[in-house]
Every structure is written in C-alpha cells, then in structure tokens.
Amino acid sequence: MQTTSKTIDPLLKSIANRSPHASFFPVYEFLRAAARIFLLQEIELLVMAYRLETKGWELDDQLIVQGSDCMGELFSCPKERSEYRQVTLYILLVSYWSKTALNEDCTYLLDEVKRICHNFNCLF
C-alpha cells in the first residue's frame, strides 16, 4: 500500500516548521527528498519527528561535521557553505535511523543513499 502525499506532506511540513534551521535552510525540501529516498511512511515520519524533538538537531556532532565532507549533491547547494551538507546528512541519518527502527532489513536502501554520501555505512 502506497501512502499519498496528502498524508506525508503535512507531516514533513510540521517537522520542517519545528526545526530551528528552517529559516536558514530548505529543511522541508531536504526532508521531502529523504522521505522519497528511504520510502518513509507516516509511522516512520512520526518516529523521526519524535527523535528530532527529543534529541534536537545535532549538527555540530563530529560525525556530522566530518561526514559532510563526503556528501555528494542532493540539491545544488553552495559548496562554500558546509552547513547545507551537514543539515542534509543529518536528515539522511535520522531518516535511515527511523526506517531501521521499525523495519528489520533496510540494507537495500544503502545503495541509494551511498550515491549521496559515499561513506554512509561508516557514519551509521
């Protein structure tokens, strides 16, 4: 059963609006791309929202800072602004965590995300 954007988009907008980074970065677009990459459903988005609400947006974590150097392009972001890559990487990590928290085997998604972040396996 495939979920429609009628249920997914409001959840993504809600998560993006609650982000402290929404006024500086296109968080909604990053979340939407991650939801497509990881085939996230409503329950997985709720798990992601809970994770972000309780843990916050840990963009200054050393793994995020170092891992953002290996990021490819998800969107055309200014290369001189590493913060764009950090936000994107953090959203990818939290999205993957949400997917794996509710599903046993998600290794099939790693090939897709490795096109964006070359050393994603080492980060997660």
Image: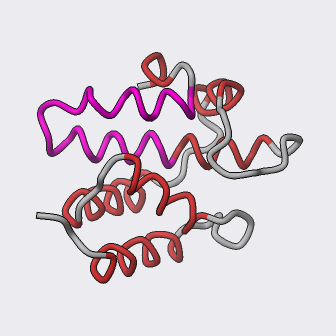
Percent x, y of residue 94: 41, 45
Main SS, magenta region, reads helix
Task: Determine whether, in the image, residue 11 is placed left or right of residue 82.
Answer: left
Q: Quadrant of the C terminus?
A: top left
In the depicted structure, whether residue 5 falls above or below residue 61: below
Q: Residue at x 26, y 75 (%)?
A: 4
Q: Nearer the viewer, residue 72 or 64?
A: 72
In the depicted structure, whether residue 63 falls above or below residue 6: above
How many numbered discs, if any? 0
Q: Residue at x 65, y 32 (%)?
A: 71
Q: Nearer the viewer, residue 115 or 67?
A: 115
Scheme by which the image is coloured: secondary structure
Question: Magenta includes 123?
Answer: no
Q: Quadrant of the N terminus?
A: bottom left
Percent x, y of residue 45: 30, 61
Q: Residue at x 44, y 39 (%)?
A: 93
In the depicted structure, whether residue 28 falls above or below residue 55: below
Q: For residue 100, which quarter of the picture?
A: top left
Q: Nearer the viewer, residue 121 or 76?
A: 76
Percent x, y of residue 81: 83, 46
Q: Residue at x 29, y 55 (%)?
A: 40
Q: Which residues are magenta?
A: 91-117
Question: Magenta includes 98?
Answer: yes
Percent x, y of residue 58: 55, 45
